Image (spheres, helix red, strand yellow):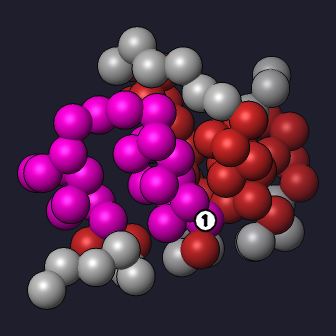
Amino acid sequence: MLTLSSHSNTYTLLSRLCQATPHTYTSAIGSAARAGRPADAAGWYARMLRDGQTPDTWTLNALLLAYANVADAAGALGIYT
């Protein structure tokens, strides 16, 4: 059974099964945040923007959390510059 408990499973699920929506991208960003992988979260965010999806407050919070979880304030600030 495939669950969203691990980052790699989330990547597999979203890459193979789901239609890309803001919610699915936010789920992937949140999964990367929980795994302590801000670079992956930023990658999902960039992919979201490339695919023409509009991030919402939940998306941006998940992305900021990814950097907060590894105490990378400079990385978090880099989102907006």
Q: Which of 3 and 6 is in front in this view?
A: 3
Disc 1: CA contacts within 10 A as few (<14), some (14-19) or many (>=20): many
Say what amino acid the circle numbered 1 marks: Ala
Q: Name the residue under label 1.
A: 33
Residue at image coords 29%, 34% = 20
Q: What element carries label 1?
A: helix
Quadrant position of residue 72: bottom right
Residue at image coords 84%, 69% = 71
State the image coordinates of residue 16 (x, y, percent, origin top left): 10, 51
Compared across the picture, whether 45 is left or right of 36 comes to left
Residue at image coords 18%, 79% = 2
Residue at image coords 13%, 86% = 1
State the image coordinates of residue 57 (x, y, percent, origin top left): 73, 35
- Compared to residue 45, the image places residue 24 above or below, namely below
Q: Residue 26 colored magenta?
A: yes
Compared across the picture, whether 3 is left or right of 40 comes to left
